[in-house]
Image: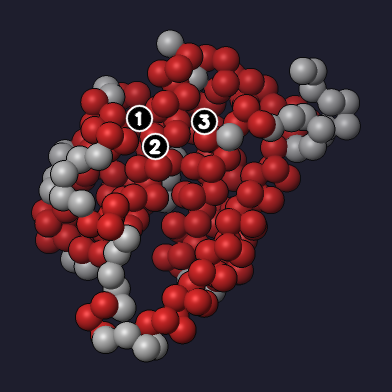
Amino acid sequence: MEVGSQLTEKGQRDYKLVKQALETGDQAAFSDLLKFYRDSLYFMMLKMTNNPHDAEDLTIEAFGKAFKNLKQYTPDYAFSTWLFKIATNNCIDFMRKKSKGVQAINNEPEESAHALPAQLAAANLDPEEAFIKGQKIEMMREVVTKLKPHYKKLIELRYFKEYSYEEIVDELHLPLGTVKAQLFRAREFLFNILKNSRERI
């Protein structure tokens, strides 16, 4: 498919990066798209949620979903429009679920309020995490350097230095549930990019 003439110069730049990412699995193309829209997407999520941690998580999720479904993007409209639509829909779903969760939590004992989904609590590596750990570190660095410092630190500790969850908790002074939940989102994001890359090799 050819770049639509209706795209702006910025839109055509993004479309070239999308093609590059799809055709070659080039991490630099992924990281450029991340760099261009990370902050504006984060602030949009922050405006919608009024919560910095949720905004960070939702920003990562939106990029992860976009990169996973990159083949579905067409140049009928700008990549940024498509990305922000994904982010908005995901955020609305998140807030709806969170609202229901708050109602449920109000009827639960305090200790169960922060319970994690079963897949987050697993101590052993699942196939996605094993796949990420099996990649060469340099393959990920291009993308990871464009993440916000908080996520960058989490990923560096878990995948580059191979810290355990407990060691990350000690290092960052965060609750175990927070570490697992945020690494779960970051892992999905990295897995989608690395999987696309390997499929193009």
Q: Quadrant of the C terminus?
A: top left
Please, which residue is most extreme toward the right here? Answer: 6
Residue pictured at 45% horizontal, 17% vertical: 199
In this rendering, the label closer to the viewer, 3 or 2: 2
Find residue 73 and report its image quarter.
Answer: top right
| Residue linked to disc 1 | 140
Instruction: Say which label, 2 or 1, has the lower sequence index.
Output: 1
Residue pictured at 37% horizontal, 46% vertical: 186
What is the secondary structure assignment of the residue under circle 3? helix
Q: CA distance from mark 1 to mark 3?
A: 11 Å
Q: CA distance from mark 3 to mark 2?
A: 10 Å
Please, which residue is most extreme toward the top here? Answer: 201
Instruction: Say which label, 3 or 2, has the lower sequence index.
Output: 3
| Residue linked to disc 2 | 190
| Residue linked to disc 3 | 30
Q: CA distance from mark 2 to mark 1?
A: 8 Å
Q: Position of residue 181 (x, y in %)?
A: 32, 58
Q: Position of residue 75 (x, y in %)?
A: 77, 29
Amino acid marked by disc 2: Leu
Q: Nearer the viewer, residue 27 or 73?
A: 73
